[in-house]
Image: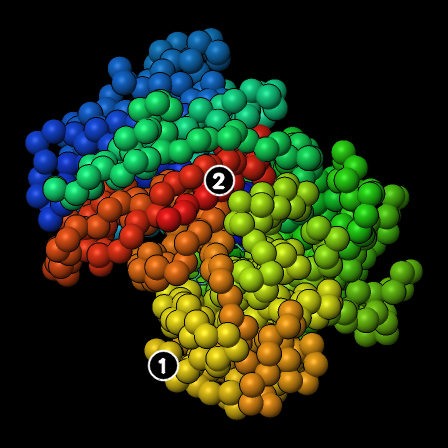
């Protein structure tokens, strides 16, 4: 599924709240609202300020030990560096079996001896080498005639090796083979042999051989008896489908991984000796690792974990407080509340606990049995796990999304075009996204989601590279027919829009401008074909938050749990201290949900968002709901935040005086005439060039939505000075920020901190770790003399996010720090470890 903590699949953090990295909880991954442990390569503690080595571990990081996944995976760095890891005791990953802890879902790291022993005892097998035959679920053998019995995978290879290095190694060992392949980043390679004799010799030679501190293993490839498809209908270049691929998984940039809440070292391995490991990992375990707990216990678990994360803010700000500067009151008082930086007011429950996701991103791949499957990946591509399992047991997926996944899966059994293979970066069918929109009103509050769903958008991601238009068109026609028939069979499903996204890149995450092709939805009862009728509808659906109607484009971010998001936004609004004289900055505003739901409580909203289609949705949503006091700026916040704050916060204090916009860095609006032109463009977006929309460079090319109530006036009583427009005088400046998983850009943090008129900041985050890191910079007192950052310092690469924030705080210009006032979480992601956190900062 996707992100919010899912859509922000974003950069690769690993435990995303959302199933797909996009929402995530911004994801993961991705938001698919969502959160994490970091990769086990050098992280934080030992190398800190100025890149200097510290002799002791950082107590600021010791709270990691309370992270639910603390030491639940073996440290791959430790293993591959002969038992050394620069993090020492502070490493989040276990240094050896003794340190290893059980995971929240009661499983053990599948690569650990414990997991293997468990496996043995479950399967009743003897302790022979067989149980170590951990296997890959995807075979990549570019030889049509390759006999699966003569294909093996080699495990525990150095991840940095390419195919060439594997071949060199085999050559040095005098191994005779037919083909050998390995992809950088994976610990697994694939070798095929000409004969049983060759295979036998190779196994004798290779099994147990040491490479570094690892012992090589020879494993089978699953599934062993994959039924090869008849590929005769395929275009030539697609012949890689002949490969025995059983799984599509993530590659290094895999979103789905993060949305599952997996961490990088988290492999789901298969064993030829037993199916037990497979049983231990299922789509349910991976996508909803807390589903085995009662909802009350899940909340308790999240609460404890969030409190530990919050305490990092206190510890790090204390540590970063410059010499000679008094500790702020909130740090001194933190002792009275157990080290918390402010009061933690607990977690608001999700109104819906099951089937709550309004957006699911399903991977396309092969099951462990080799069947084309639409669902969730079971593990990490790097460790060779690419199998996909149906989402049937994942309680956060709605029945509607499950049914669409099944329809697509059945369609794929008969498709002449191949599934995407991440190993080879070839294939056609990549992903299925199902987005649901609810009806307005009471029905939407039902305890099960299905009856309240009135609109569904189905988006299929493909890679059309090298495919003839004729083949493509025929396949899409059949696809539309399959979805239409599936949606009308038995109990009908809503089907509002069907769209194909063409993503030719190798990463799992399509860029925002990947071409979209809406498909006509055939009329009920008609056959496929050119006369099937059907209408191309605009690829958008609608949902409701706080009785406002929101139009959502296929790729725009929208919180995946609408009813819980409503709670989140109203909490943020309550804490923001809004009033008619408030100017509210909605930073990272997506489709405008926060600003628009709060617009009636403020004088004006300025929304900032980099995704052009989300901004155009935001503008449309303002129009749909008759809201006229919002302006949406399409740009990266880091490019425009400073100039927007300057523009609005430096408004002369005398009533009704028009500010001099020409002072603005980015010339957001250079004068009243330009401003009117911008407004006109905003009201007539077709008139603005797509370049302007896409460029995202500064606000001068922004889509703006300052709407006028009457010809010359802004809503809410702004006065008109020169016959055009004027800006009202605001007394209260507030920002609500809701960034993706990685948090705010340092330039945005600096702008918010150094504009003293901004007294209140509500920070919403799907990733409490990045909230804490950003809050360290916002709340640490500045030194009288600011340190200059050293651009050549590479030490930051090894810092934790908190360590890096402490480091940055040193170069923060002298400015009044914020203080954490209170924090609360809203559970947008039941059954996963993720949660949205809200923190009020004031000064
Ligand atoms: C977690 S979502 C929040 C969206 C919105 N506040 C909501 O609740 O629906 C984060 C949003 O930030 C946007 N975004 C990511 N990086 C950004 C940046 N550098 N500047 C502005 N917007 C950004 C994403 O496109 C996404 O819409």
The answer to whether the residue bearing label 1 lies less than 8 angstroms from the nearest atom of ligand 1 is no
Along the line of sight, the residue nearer the viewer: 633 or 527: 633
Name the quadrant containing residue 315: top left
Q: How is the image coloured?
A: rainbow
Q: CA distance from mark 1 to mark 2?
A: 36 Å
Along the line of sight, the residue nearer the viewer: 559 or 224: 559
Give the residue displayed 45% in from the left and 44% down from the top.
840
Q: Is residue 756 left or right of residue 689?
A: left
Name the quadrant containing residue 100: top left
Task: Please tell me whether mark 1 or mark 2 is closer to you in this view.
Answer: 1
Give the residue displayed 44% in from the left and 51% down from the top.
761
> Which label was assigned to residue 663?
1
Q: Please determine whether, in this image, residue 173 is positioned above or below residue 628.
A: above
Residue 734 visible in the displayed image? yes
**Are there few (<14), some (14-19), or many (20+) residues within 10 Å of tag 1?**
some
- Residue 713: percent from the left, percent from the top? 64, 80
Q: The residue tagged with tag 1: helix, strand or loop?
A: helix
Residue to which mark 2 is pinned: 837
**Are there few (<14), some (14-19), or many (20+) residues within 10 Å of tag 2?**
many
- Residue 373: percent from the left, percent from the top? 62, 43
Q: Count the marks: how many?
A: 2
- Residue 526: percent from the left, percent from the top? 89, 64
- Residue 595: percent from the left, percent from the top? 59, 59
Give the residue displayed 62% in from the left and 31% down from the top.
349
Along the line of sight, the residue nearer the viewer: 829 or 619: 619
Mark 1 / mark 2, whichever is N-terminal? 1
Q: Is residue 4 left or right of residue 170?
A: right
Q: Please determine whether, in this image, residue 671 is positioned above or below residue 125.
A: below
């Amino acid at each position: 599924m996707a992100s919010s903590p899912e859509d922000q699949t974003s950069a690769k953090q690993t435990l995303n709240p959302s199933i797909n990295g996009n929402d995530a909880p911004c994801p993961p991954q991705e938001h698919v609202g969502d959160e994490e442990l970091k990769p086990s390569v050098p992280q934080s503690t030992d190398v800190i300020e100025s890149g200097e080595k510290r002799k002791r571990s950082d107590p600021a990081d010791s709270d990691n030990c309370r992270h639910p996944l603390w030491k639940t995976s073996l440290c791959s760095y430790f293993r591959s560096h002969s038992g050394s890891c620069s993090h020492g005791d502070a490493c989040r990953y276990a240094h050896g079996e003794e340190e290893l802890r059980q995971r929240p879902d009661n499983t053990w790291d599948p690569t650990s001896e414990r997991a293997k022993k468990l496996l043995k005892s479950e399967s009743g097998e003897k302790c022979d080498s067989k149980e170590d035959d951990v296997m890959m679920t995807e075979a990549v053998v570019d030889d049509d005639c390759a006999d699966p019995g003569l294909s093996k995978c080699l495990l525990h290879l150095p991840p940095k090796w390419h195919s060439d290095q594997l071949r060199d190694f085999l050559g040095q060992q005098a191994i005779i083979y037919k083909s050998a392949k390995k992809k950088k980043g994976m610990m697994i390679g694939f070798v095929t042999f000409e004969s049983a004799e060759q295979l036998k010799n190779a196994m004798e030679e290779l099994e147990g051989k040491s490479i570094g501190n690892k012992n090589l293993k020879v494993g089978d490839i699953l599934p062993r008896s994959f039924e090869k498809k008849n590929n005769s209908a395929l275009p030539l270049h697609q012949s890689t489908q002949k490969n025995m691929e059983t799984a599509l998984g993530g590659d290094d940039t895999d979103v789905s991984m993060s949305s599952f809440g997996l961490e990088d070292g988290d492999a789901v391995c298969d064993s030829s000796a037993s199916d037990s490991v497979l049983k231990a990992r299922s789509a349910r375990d991976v996508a909803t690792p807390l589903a085995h707990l009662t909802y009350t216990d899940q909340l308790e678990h999240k609460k404890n974990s969030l409190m530990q994360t919050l305490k990092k803010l206190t510890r790090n700000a204390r540590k970063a407080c410059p010499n000679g500067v008094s500790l702020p009151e909130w740090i001194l008082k933190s002792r009275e509340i157990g080290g918390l930086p402010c009061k933690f007011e607990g977690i608001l429950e999700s109104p819906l606990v099951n089937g709550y996701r309004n957006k699911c991103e399903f991977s396309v791949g092969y099951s462990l049995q080799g069947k084309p499957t639409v669902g969730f990946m079971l593990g990490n591509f790097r460790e060779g796990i690419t199998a996909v399992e149906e989402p049937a047991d994942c309680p956060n997926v709605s029945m509607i999304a499950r049914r669409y996944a099944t329809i697509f899966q059945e369609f794929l059994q008969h498709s002449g075009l191949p599934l995407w293979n991440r190993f080879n970066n070839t294939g056609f069918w990549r992903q299925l996204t199902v987005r649901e929109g609810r009806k307005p009103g009471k029905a939407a509050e039902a305890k099960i989601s299905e009856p309240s769903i009135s609109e569904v958008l189905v988006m299929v991601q493909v890679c059309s590279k090298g495919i003839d238009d004729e083949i493509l068109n025929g396949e899409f026609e059949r696809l539309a027919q399959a979805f239409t028939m599936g949606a009308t069979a038995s109990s009908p499903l809503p089907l509002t829009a069907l769209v194909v996204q063409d993503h030719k890149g190798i990463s799992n995450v399509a860029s925002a401008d990947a071409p979209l092709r809406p498909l006509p939805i055939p009329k009920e009862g008609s056959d496929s074909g050119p006369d099937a009728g059907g209408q191309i509808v605009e690829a958008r659906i609608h949902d409701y938050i706080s009785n406002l109607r929101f139009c959502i484009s296929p790729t725009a971010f929208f919180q995946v749990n609408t009813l819980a998001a409503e709670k989140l936004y109203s909490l943020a609004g309550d804490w923001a201290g809004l009033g008619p004289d408030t100017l509210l900055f909605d930073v990272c505003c997506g489709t405008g949900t926060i600003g628009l739901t709060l617009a009636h409580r403020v004088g004006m909203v300025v929304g900032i968002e980099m995704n052009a289609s989300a901004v155009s949705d935001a503008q449309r949503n303002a129009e749909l709901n008759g809201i006229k006091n919002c302006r949406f700026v399409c740009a990266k916040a880091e490019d425009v935040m400073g100039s927007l704050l300057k523009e609005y916060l430096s408004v002369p204090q005398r009533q009704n005086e028009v500010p001099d916009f020409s002072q603005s860095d980015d010339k957001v609006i250079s004068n009243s005439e330009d401003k009117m032109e911008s407004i006109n463009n905003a009201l007539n977006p077709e008139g603005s060039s797509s370049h302007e929309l896409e460029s995202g460079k500064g606000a001068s090319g922004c889509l703006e939505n300052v709407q006028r109530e009457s010809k010359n006036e802004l809503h809410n009583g702004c006065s008109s000075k020169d016959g055009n427009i004027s800006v009202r005088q605001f007394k209260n400046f507030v920002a609500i920020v809701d960034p993706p998983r990685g948090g705010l850009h340092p330039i945005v943090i600096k702008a918010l901190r150094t504009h003293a008129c901004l007294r209140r900041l509500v920070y919403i985050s799907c990733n409490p770790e990045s909230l804490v890191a950003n809050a360290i910079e916002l709340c640490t007192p500045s030194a009288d003399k600011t340190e200059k950052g050293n651009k050549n310092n590479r030490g930051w690469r090894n810092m934790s996010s908190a360590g890096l924030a402490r480091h940055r705080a040193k170069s923060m210009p002298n400015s009044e720090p914020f203080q954490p006032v209170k924090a609360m979480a809203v559970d947008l992601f039941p059954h996963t470890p993720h949660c949205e956190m809200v923190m009020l900062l004031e000064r």
